[in-house]
Image (spheres, rainbow, N blue to C red):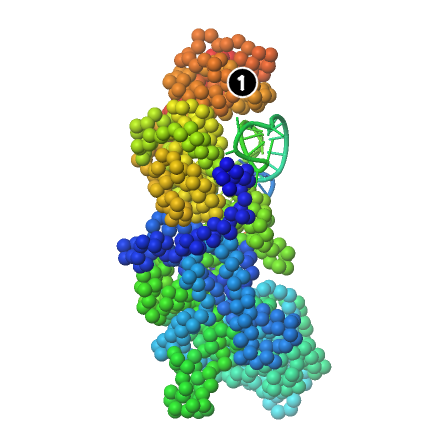
RNA sequence: GGGCGCAUAGCUCAGUUGGUUAGAGCGCUUCUCUUACACAGAAGAGGUCAGGGGUUCGAGUCCCUUUGCGCCCACCA
């Protein structure tokens, strides 16, 4: 395709895959994309981004484009700045999620359960599943343009990462920070595994509060009669747990029950006798003031039981059915037992009443079923010493969290953290590296042992459990770099620079990575944590399948292109704040990509036509501040660009990517496309200015592409290629230096002019814009056809030179007939039958005979005058007050000038009236 | 019970060392198929920045407070 045939609309569909392929084939995603440079150049600073690997089960959802966009922007920006950038892609085995998915597939396709299949076969099948579908998500990430180093791709169950997991486990064990024992944990009856505190979600729901009688044991040993004898009233929302009660607790100061302390009460139905104890924990005001104690199934009761040495009875099996301790209810489901038990108690005359009650119900994050606190033998990490160090790292600034407010959340969580239950009763994951012999000795080993380390028995069997997925994820920043080996990667790239993720996994992931990083490597795993917001739908609702508002990013990309989606994610969102996304926004940004494309086409065609005329361009200056006879427009757009570069750089340093994108957008569309390109069309027609115009067009486009590249890599790369192509044979050598390399290794732009150089040019051009707008406004008001060239008489006053110099541009933009336009310093007599405009101190008369309604003219001028006068009043008041004394001088001066301007305007208008 | 966030144009949102006429996109009104782009161009309407108080020469921006939403953490049966 020749450049002349570039399509009018940017064709992202065919462009994006081609570009990505080119990048990948060119090795641009590797840390040193220049083949001439050594791999681990000590003189080049590495920039490494640590990211949460997506679940291997995952289909691309709308959250992915969010983090991929941010991460890719960070990487591309630093790559362009010359860092050795590394972004390791990969996936997480996601124990529970994957196992569930494979189980579901097996049941549906082969009608077998995982138990029927057996562990070995099931794990084999899961690996097959992973091979088949694991690439889905990574291909989708490629489609998003992620410039990660695929040659270093990792999976958490890889041999290397698995080795790191073992090493980590063994080290913690040897240090005494891992222990095994029966504790009260959260049990998910659906998944039949323990889950950590973080994997339990609490939802407020309607429940029933059941009031019943705990009959006090009679001194005579006779069974108490519910209607006559003494009892302690107790309330519960889980009556079935009565089966596991081992005490009734009351407050020591409670007058109502004090007399019973030390006595015994009788467990309904079962008839066991349990003590009445006193404990401060019990609240006298709440419920009946008496609390049943079920240490086996309630964390608070568990704590009380520990204080009072109470026995602990477990009444549930792993499916949450009543076990042998539940007497007649054995084998019943927990909810059936609840009903049956209550009915039986009612018959026995032990119930008082029930009432509706709103409370928080713990549910499994994955399965959604009610989680049961249960006593179970599990593996735990003693977390407090790790947490202490991790807290310190953020407190002293070794790890910075963006936005800062999340540091507080982080502190709060780590300060109150409890031991981490790391064992899971699953099959898919890293199996716990512990072996037991028949004598019960434990062997903890890095390599699979053949015999018991204590007694030498060869009859050893490995622990059945696997580790919490987050245990391996927590090692990601260094396990992917080769830890525990001191590999070149590890030595050069660790610790990493940024960690980028959503704030929702601050605890799950970030905190654990910091803890584990510090523990195992002695260093923080990353310097900065950047937390992006969550993506919501167009009207701010949380995305969920049940709401039916799922947004498929692939559909959006098909419709509008990847760049549009990426730009949408990046612009209009701020760190840590949720952002709403819908097709409307993406469409608008598709339009922007198209705008850029067409501006690019224009620039390229300008260069092409110049080449056809075989014009020679004398191009000696690398800066346009001095020397050449640049037009105001040339200087102005260049000045705006210099400012833009500075602003974007500052914003990037402060993680304000959204604002940076917005500013580039505005520059490209409003300044470059709407104004400069329009003026360039005229300048290209003239021998004197055409070369410099082409050069300015090329330079501004070139720089804009670089600035935009981290946001919208595909379209910028594509235009860049065509631009280089066009420039290759011209004498516009300066920006051809990188040809034919891809934009991705082009340098990040630096401002080329001294700071402050821009101001005068911008002010002059702004005046020109004001005049043009004002004339256009009048034309619109009077319905003057756009094609009609009108004459004008302009009194330029102090701006006379500028206006004379810019008369052609002004005429062009405002639709004036240049030949019939006169520009003078002042007018002795104002033209008749003319509409009058005043811009600052400049008077403009447009003779529109037949269209002038004097009354209308007067009204308009009066309105302008009123505006000017109110401004004068405002500014006079301002300058008369303390402002003049206390505000910075430059600011005061600026306001004075403004006042002067309005005074002149008012003066001119008054003269016209 | 603690902690955090949000409240700015009809809608969705920007506005980060406080600087004086508050911005964008979409939507709306009027005009234009002008040779980069109708996925466009030009002009325009639309906001007492949730309410109240304070600091300051100056507050959308900082402090206090009220109201309304939302989120996170937490062991009251």
For this orientation, the residue located farthest to the right is: A347
Under circle 1, the secondary element is loop
Label count reads: 1
At horizontal 47% and vertical 44% (from top left) the residue drawn is: A718
Q: Position of residue A245 (x, y in %)?
A: 57, 81
Left/right of residue A776 with respect to residue A635 in the rendered view = right
- Tell which of B17 and A750 is nearer to you: A750
Residue situated in front as seen by the camera: A103 or A829: A103
Q: Which residue sits at x=67%, y=69%?
A: A355
As rendered, which of A11 and A314 lies closer to the eye?
Answer: A11
Location of residue A7 (image quadrant): top right
Quick one: A228 or A871, which is closer to the camera?
A871
Question: Which residue position holds label 1?
Answer: A789
Residue at left 31%, top 33%? A621
Q: Is residue A722 above or below residue B71?
A: above
Residue A44, image x, y percentages: 30, 54
Q: Residue A198: horizontal and vertical position, in percent?
A: 50, 67
Q: Is residue A29 visible?
A: yes
Q: Is residue A693 left or right of residue B24?
A: left
Q: What residue do we see at 57% from left, 53% from top? A: A554
Instruction: Place residue A823 in its image quadrant.
Output: top left
Give the x, y percent position of residue A843. 46, 16
In which quarter of the view is residue A36 placed?
Answer: bottom left
Q: Is residue A843 above or below residue B13?
A: above
Residue A811 in the figure: left or right of residue A167: right
Q: Eyeballing the image, is A430 above or below B39?
A: below
User: Which chain's residue wears label 1?
Assistant: A
């Amino acid at each position: 395709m020749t450049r002349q045939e570039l399509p009018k609309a940017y064709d992202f569909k065919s462009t994006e895959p081609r570009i990505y392929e080119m990048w990948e084939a060119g090795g641009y995603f590797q840390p040193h994309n220049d083949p001439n440079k050594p791999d681990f150049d000590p003189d080049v600073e590495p920039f490494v981004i640590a990211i949460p690997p997506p679940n291997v089960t995952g289909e691309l959802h709308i959250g992915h484009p969010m983090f991929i966009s941010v991460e890719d922007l960070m990487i591309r920006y630093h790559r362009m700045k010359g860092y050795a950038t590394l972004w390791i892609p990969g996936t997480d085995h996601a124990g529970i999620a994957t196992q569930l998915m494979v189980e579901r597939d097996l049941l549906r396709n082969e009608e077998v359960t995982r138990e029927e299949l057996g562990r070995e076969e099931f794990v084999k099948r899961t690996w097959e599943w992973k091979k088949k579908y694991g690439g889905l998500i990574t291909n989708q990430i490629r489609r998003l343009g992620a410039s990660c180093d695929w040659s270093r791709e990792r999976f958490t169950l890889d041999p290397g990462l698995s080795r790191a997991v073992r090493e980590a486990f063994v080290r913690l064990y040897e240090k005494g920070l891992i222990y095994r024992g029966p504790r009260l944990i959260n049990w998910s009856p659906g998944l039949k595994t323990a889950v950590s505190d973080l994997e339990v979600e609490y939802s407020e729901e309607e429940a029933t509060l059941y009031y019943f009688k705990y009959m006090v044991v009679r001194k005579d040993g006779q069974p108490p009669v519910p209607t006559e004898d003494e009892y302690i009233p107790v309330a519960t929302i889980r009556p079935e747990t009565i089966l596991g009660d081992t005490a009734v607790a009351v407050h020591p100061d409670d007058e109502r029950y004090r007399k019973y302390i030390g006595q015994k009460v009788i467990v309904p139905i079962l008839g066991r006798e349990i003590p009445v104890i006193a404990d401060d924990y019990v609240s006298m005001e709440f419920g009946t003031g008496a609390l049943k104690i079920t240490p086996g199934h309630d964390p608070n009761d568990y704590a009380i039981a520990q204080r009072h040495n109470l026995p602990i009875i477990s009444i549930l099996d792993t499916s949450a059915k009543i076990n042998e301790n539940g007497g007649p209810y054995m084998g019943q489901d927990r909810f059936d037992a609840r009903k049956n038990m209550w009915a039986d108690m009612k018959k026995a005359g032990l119930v008082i009443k029930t009432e509706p009650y709103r409370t928080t119900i713990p549910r499994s994050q994955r399965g959604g079923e009610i989680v049961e606190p249960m006593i179970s033998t599990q593996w735990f990490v003693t977390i407090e010493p790790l947490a202490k160090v991790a807290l310190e790292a953020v407190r002293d600034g070794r790890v910075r969290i963006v936005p800062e407010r999340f540091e507080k959340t982080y502190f709060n969580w780590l300060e109150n953290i409890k031991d981490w239950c790391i064992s899971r009763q699953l099959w898919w994951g890293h199996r716990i590296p512990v072996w037991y012999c028949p004598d019960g000795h434990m062997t903890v080993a890095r390599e699979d042992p053949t015999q018991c380390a204590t007694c030498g028995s060869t009859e050893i069997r490995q622990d059945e459990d696997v580790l919490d997925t987050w245990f391996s994820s927590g090692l990601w920043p260094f396990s992917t770099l080769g830890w525990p080996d001191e590999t070149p990667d590890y030595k050069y790239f660790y610790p990493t620079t940024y960690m980028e993720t959503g704030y929702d996994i601050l605890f799950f992931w970030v905190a654990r990575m910091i803890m584990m990083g510090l523990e195992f490597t002695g260093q923080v795993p990353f310097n900065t944590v950047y937390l992006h917001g969550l993506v919501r739908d167009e009207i701010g609702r949380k995305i969920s399948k049940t709401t039916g508002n799922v947004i498929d990013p692939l559909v959006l990309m098909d419709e509008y292109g990847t760049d549009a989606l990426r730009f949408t994610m990046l612009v209009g969102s701020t760190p840590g704040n949720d952002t709403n996304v819908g097709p409307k926004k993406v469409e608008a940004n598709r339009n922007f990509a198209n705008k850029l494309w067409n501006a690019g086409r224009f620039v390229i065609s300008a260069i092409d036509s110049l080449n056809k005329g075989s014009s020679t361009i004398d191009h000696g200056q690398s800066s346009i501040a001095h020397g050449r006879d640049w037009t105001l427009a040339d200087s102005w757009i260049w000045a705006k660009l210099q400012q833009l570069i500075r602003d974007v750089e500052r914003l990037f340093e402060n993680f304000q990517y959204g604002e940076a994108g917005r500013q580039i957008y505005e520059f490209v569309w409003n300044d470059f496309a709407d104004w400069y390109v329009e003026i360039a069309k005229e300048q290209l027609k003239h021998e004197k200015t055409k070369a410099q115009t082409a050069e300015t067009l090329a330079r501004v486009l070139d720089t804009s592409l670089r600035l935009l590249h981290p946001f919208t890599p595909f379209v910028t790369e594509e235009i860049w290629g065509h631009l280089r192509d066009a420039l290759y044979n011209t004498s516009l050598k300066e920006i051809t230096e990188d040809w034919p390399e891809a934009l991705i290794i082009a340098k990040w732009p630096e401002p080329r002019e001294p700071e402050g150089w821009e101001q005068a040019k911008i002010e002059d051009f702004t005046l020109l814009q004001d005049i043009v707008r004002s004339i256009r406004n009048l034309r619109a008001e009077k319905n003057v056809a756009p094609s009609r060239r009108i004459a004008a008489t302009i009194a330029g006053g102090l701006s006379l030179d500028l206006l004379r110099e810019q008369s052609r541009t002004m005429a062009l933009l405002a639709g004036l007939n240049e030949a019939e336009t006169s520009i003078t310093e002042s007018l002795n007599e104002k033209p008749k039958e003319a509409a009058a405009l005043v811009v600052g101190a400049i008077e403009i008369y447009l003779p529109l005979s037949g269209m002038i309604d004097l009354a209308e003219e007067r009204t308009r001028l009066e309105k302008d005058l009123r505006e000017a006068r109110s401004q004068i009043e405002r500014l006079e008041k301002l300058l008369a007050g303390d402002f003049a004394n206390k505000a910075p001088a430059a600011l005061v001066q600026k306001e004075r000038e403004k006042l002067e301007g309005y005074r002149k305007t008012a003066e001119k208008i008054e003269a016209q009236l």
